[in-house]
Image (tube, grey):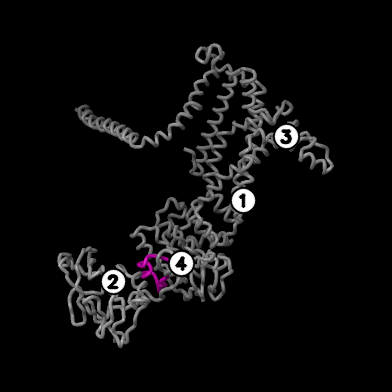
Amino acid sequence: MSGVNLSGIVKAYGALQVVHGIDLTVEEKEFVVLVGPSGCGKSTTLRMIAGLEEITAGDLTIDGRRMNRVAPKDRDVAMVFQNYALYPHLNVAENMAFGLRIRKTPKDEIKTTIADVANVLGLTEYLDRRPADLSGGQRQRVAMGRAIVRHPKVFLFDEPLSNLDAKLRTQMRAEIKRLHNRLGVTSVYVTHDQVEAMTLADRIVVMNNGSIEQVGTPMELFNNPANTFVASFLGSPPMNQMKGTLTENGAKVGGVEFKVNGAVNGNAGRDVIVGIRPEHVTLKPSHETSALPIGLDLVEPLGSEALLHARHGDNSLVFKADTEGDIDHLSGVKEVHVPAHVVKLFDAETGRALNLEV
Amino acid sequence: MAEEFSTALQEPLKGTSSRSEEGRMTRLIDHFKREWQIYAMLLPTIIWFIVFLYKPMYGLQIAFKDYSIFRGVAGSPWIGLEHFNTLFSNDQFIRAVWNTIQISALNLLFGFPAPIILALMFNEVLHASFKRTSQTIVYLPHFISSVIISGIVITAFSPSAGIVNTVIGWLGFEPVYFLTQPEWFRPIFVGTGIWQEAGFGSIVFLAAIAGVNPSLYESAVVDGANRWQMMWKITVPSILPTILIMLIIRIGNIMEVSFELVILLYQPSTYETADVVNTWIYRQGLQSGQYDLAAAAGLFNALVAFVLVMTANTLSRRFSRTSLW
């Protein structure tokens, strides 16, 4: 089983601890994305798995074997770097063959493997070119090709798409996903882009300040964030958060009382943060919704949808609304309607999600 | 009709061209006014070039004249290529040319790779303070004057008290008069040059190594490369453009063997292998007063260097995409 297991992994540089005891299991063939803001420790964690950073404490196992003291070359992992790390003096074929040559793979086998992988990645006609003569997307494919030819047990991706423009990133994202479905190799992928995380991952690991905030499938994390950090990190635009108080009937923000799913059961008066995803509101009222009066600042059309930038009291809010082909009708919006089941509640002190009894 | 049509077509083009010329000139003047401080900073360098490199070129004409200091450069009569005929029929000059080429070839063979090897070795040293100390030690000889360097070499190879002959004595051999024997001049000269300059020369290559993308090494580590493989397969190819540029510059200076060091180390008994073009020019020009003949030899030197640097640059551009210009 080519899974990766991190148990109590710590990384410290002298007295400065940057990763604080991470526990994570990546199952065989699973695609796990580590996501978080800059400096949260996600790349350091990936580099510890690769063997490029020493593990200060804890245990790392790959395929059931403890890897803490094993050299990177003996871990049977392949890594795709942010800046591609292609050797500028070698052509595409030589770049892809580098690892195989180092491992003294027979020449015929190298040739066949490279031809196969180049075919899969659409690089056959570029095999004689040097990296300087390739576009960003082609370079990225070569970097992936170099990893694939080695048939490793684990692929490690360190923000591989961050140097590409938005259009190419979307295209390459889909290619990575297709490739993973085809090869089925256990993959750990680091990114700070939550869209990449949501679209690629079987499971997402949200990291912050060297610790894991939440692990789960993209939809689990989107629908049930464990805390305000995850709620604000995943989703674009992020979840609206307003300070409020629990009441017998729901949660009150200013003069507005939101209906919520579940029973408050004696928690009335508790300070909470009320979270509402921008896309979860409607412009039409129903008996299950609560009306939230807003002062509209700005309407940003995105095509089929528009972003409504608004204020409610001291809170700056963003909502998504269908344009229905026109945004004129949105400029007069004075309130949005929030269904009870989309209202998320978090403890005001700890920021943790509150699960009210249903 | 066709002529009229053609003229009509050309007129606006001419106008456009002259307008664009004017526009370019205006832009240049505007740029000069706006950025005059930068041009002012450039001025000392331009003055230095004019005074020390371009103005002396006026004097090169004496290579084709029967020069007399009383008649001056302009007043001396032209004699064509007579000095060049004299040069190429002079055995001592021919010998000096061959000595220059042989010493330069040895320098190129041993002296050129030395700083590269040193830089590669420094790059592999992991202990920071050891690295700093050893770098300082190898840089030091560069800052010592050639006179002192030659003094150290003469003392070290002295037949009576020199360290080299002392060791030879310990081994039971007779002392060797190194600096009076022609066969020893070149190895000693080239060795001294390496000792003096290899450390300082390694700075350029260390800077080039520092510019190599660290993720290339990380990628190679994951791929299974050891340090030796990384040095040969990543570091050396990555600094190859720098190596080639330095090689082209070196080839351009092939006729410029370190003049001071030769003057300080050679003696009549070693002229056979030690006398180079520059020392020959010095003896003929300054000591014997044949300035015109010396100028012809200097011009020949410069022409050879020019051809060599052009050839090296063209070859480098063709085969490695790296060139000085």
Secondary element type, mark 4: loop
Whether residue B272 appears in magenta in the rendering, the answer is no
Q: CA distance from mark 2 to mark 3?
A: 83 Å
Q: From this view, report whether residue B121 is shown above or below residue A270.
A: above
Contact check, label 3 and label 1, Cβ < 8 Å: no
Q: CA distance from mark 4 to mark 2?
A: 26 Å
Q: Which residue is mark 2?
A: A240
Query: Which disc is residue B121 wearing?
Result: 1
Kindly tell me whether residue A117 is visible in this rendering.
yes
Chain of the residue that carries numbered disc 2 in the rendered image: A
Q: Amino acid at mark 2?
A: Asn
Q: CA distance from mark 2 to mark 1?
A: 58 Å
- Which label lies toward us, 2 or 1? 2
Left or right of A38: which side holds B300? right
Q: Are marks 2 and 1 on the same chain?
A: no
Q: Which numbered disc, 4 or 2, marks the residue that appears first in the sequence? A: 4
Q: From this view, report whether residue A148 is shown above or below residue B39.
A: below
Q: Are marks 3 and 4 on the same chain?
A: no
Contact check, label 4 and label 2, Cβ < 8 Å: no
Q: Are marks 1 and 4 on the same chain?
A: no
Left or right of A248: which side holds A72? right
Q: CA distance from mark 3 to mark 1?
A: 30 Å
Q: Which residue is mark 4?
A: A41
Query: Which disc is residue B154 wearing?
Result: 3
